Amino acid sequence: MGRRHNLTAKDVGKKSRTPGMLSDGDGLYLSTSESLTQSWVYRYKRHGKEHRTGLGSTRDVSLAEARKAAEEYRKAVRAGKDPRSNDSITFKEAARQYIDTHSPGWRNAKHKQQWENTLETYAEPVFGHLPVSEIDLNLVLRVIQPIWGEKTETASRVRMRIENVLAWATVKGYRSGFNPAVWRGNLDAVLPAKSKIQKVQHLAALPYGELPALFPQLAGIDAIGARAVCFAILTAARSGEVRYARRDEIQGDLWVIPPDRMKAGKEHRVPLSPPALAILDQIDNSNEHIFAGPRGKPISDMTMGKLLKSRRAGITVHGFRSTFRDWVAEETNYPNHIAEMALAHTIGNQVEAAYRRGDLLQKRRELMDAWAAYVTTAPGAATPKAV
């Protein structure tokens, strides 16, 4: 039996403020995480295998209380019982509590369902029934490794979600020590990076030189789906942004998309060219949503895709954003950041972003007018000059 009471109350939060574990003796440890949060851990052996169980955070449990709890656990072990059944929770329960706590702050209601479905499908069959204190690197790999090469993006999300649940469990005192689902300095040593195994699949885009011939075909179709596709082309917007566009978002010759409908979570102002405004004038304005189906609900992505396929197979509505980007780069002198703002992309260069605090609306208006002139120009006619 090891020496007892190596630590004093003064040691908590002082010399222990480096990641690692300090022994108080007889299996009681003060654990400091990488983020310098602290908790009490009791280590013991049962059936020849070492286990750890959390006794709570140092914010809630004093040294004296931790010693008392450790003594109770020692008694349980001597009696042949498993002390984990008294204080730990299963991964399944931890995941449920984490999701219930955090989901009210998630932007999209689908995120909760995605979290639940992926953890239920991949993680729970392996260790959903186990206490979170027992989950180690080998168990995490049993979940992640089989799908890392075949379903890389899904596997990456599952890994991140397991990491978050285990981090929550550590802070709550249900487990201690290193988080085995962490990527950097851990899983990256045994799994290849996503970029090395996952081929980026870009959505099929129409070469910009072919668009002036296709656009009048689409514009000639008397259907709400065709008008939505044409509006998406003229605004270089995402199909979802177009499908859910509302009448109250149109402010004169501006389309103001609220943050909750933007991928980046920021309001986006789209200058509307005369052809784009003409499309809006052709549509019945009795519905809240501009591009609504017979029942008044926004049309589906399939409606737009099916209509486009009837005129030009092999391309996608989203691909017109790439068509627009290629045209700007090849046929105009507009700088890169103007095109990126028109596409509502986040400016990656932090220095450049610091100097581009506005949305350069007037320059983007000129760009979108030039784009509309190009798109609506019949093949063989004089192409409008883009500056």
Image (tube, grey):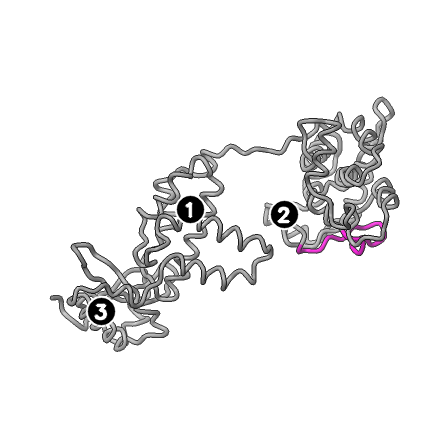
Residue carrying label 2: 346
Residue 262: x %, y % from top left = 66, 51
Alpha carbons under labels 3 and 2: distance apart: 53 Å
Residue 259 inside the magenta-drawn segment: yes
Asked where in the image residue 132 lies, by quadrant, the reply is bottom left
Q: Write the start and end of the magenta stretch as one range.
A: 246-260
Residue carrying label 3: 73
Task: Identify the amino acid type marked 3.
Answer: Tyr
Marker disc for residue 103? none
| Residue shown at the point (80%, 28%) measured from the top left | 212
Alpha carbons under labels 3 and 1: distance apart: 33 Å
Task: Identify the amino acid type marked 1.
Answer: Tyr
Task: Identify the amino acid type marked 2.
Answer: Thr
Q: Nearer the viewer, mark 2 or mark 1?
A: 1
Q: Nearer the viewer, mark 3 or mark 2?
A: 3
Q: Label 2: state its secondary structure.
A: loop
Marker disc for residue 122? 1
Q: Label 3: state its secondary structure.
A: helix
Mark before the other along the chain sequence, 2 or 1: 1
